[in-house]
């Protein structure tokens, strides 16, 4: 069985899923970063499918870039420019090619956290 990567975003300031937030995934396992996925969260704050499905899943180093600034502007939470948070990069490693990796983002206008979920 092959692994796969999922993510979701929760707006902790409003207490709701962060719908409409763009997420870009980069593969960092070569000479230069390579974009391998570009998606937007749905009404549940999740992508419609795995951001890195089983057929493309591989051990290595990756980076998710959450376009938080665009979401915060659209949701009326941006505040004054420049934004405290704009693009939020999360660099992580995948060491088990058969596991499910879940990398969520808990977001507010002035902070965020992440963890390896299930």
Image (spheres, helix red, strand yellow):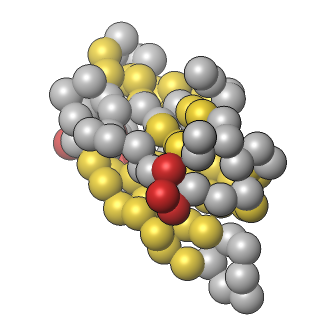
Q: Is residue 109 above or below residue 90?
A: above
Q: Residue at x 53, y 43 (%)?
A: 5
The quadrant the C terminus occupies is top right
Q: In this rendering, does residue 89 appear at all?
A: no
- Give left or right: position of 48 versus 12: left
**Residue 99 percent across, percent down from the top left:** 66, 36
Residue 96 in view, yes or no: yes
* Residue at x-position 80% and y-position 48%: 95
- Where residue 11 sits, quadrant-wise, is top left
Give the image quarter of residue 71.
Answer: top left
Judging depth in this view, the residue of 83 and 1 nearest the camera is 1
In the rendered image, the residue lying farthest to the right is 95
Name the quadrant containing residue 32: bottom right
Q: Residue furthest front?
A: 1
**Near-viewer residue (116 or 75):** 116
Residue that extends furthest to the bottom in the rendered view of this protein: 31
Using the image as rendered, state which of residue 117 and residue 3 is in the foreground: 3
> Which residue is drawn at the image coordinates 26% and 24% (left, top)?
44
Quadrant where the N terminus sits is: top right
How many marks overall? 0
Percent position (x, y) of residue 23? 40, 52
Which percent across, then down, holds residue 80? 38, 45
**Which residue is pictured at 41% across the width and 18% down the height?**
13
User: Could you tell whether 4 is left or right of 49 in the image?
Assistant: right
Q: In the visual, does 20 lie left or right of 36? A: left
Q: Residue furthest top?
A: 15
């Amino acid at each position: 069985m092959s692994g796969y990567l999922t993510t979701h975003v929760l707006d902790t300031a409003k207490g709701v899923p962060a719908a409409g937030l763009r997420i870009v995934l980069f593969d960092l396992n070569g000479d230069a970063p390579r974009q391998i996925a570009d998606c937007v969260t749905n009404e549940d704050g999740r992508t419609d499918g795995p951001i890195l499905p089983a057929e493309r899943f591989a051990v290595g180093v990756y980076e998710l870039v959450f376009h938080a600034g665009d979401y915060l502007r659209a949701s009326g939470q941006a505040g004054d420019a420049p934004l405290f948070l704009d693009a939020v990069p999360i660099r992580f490693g995948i060491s088990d090619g058969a596991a499910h990796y879940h990398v969520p983002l808990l977001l507010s206008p002035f902070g965020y956290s992440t963890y390896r979920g299930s």
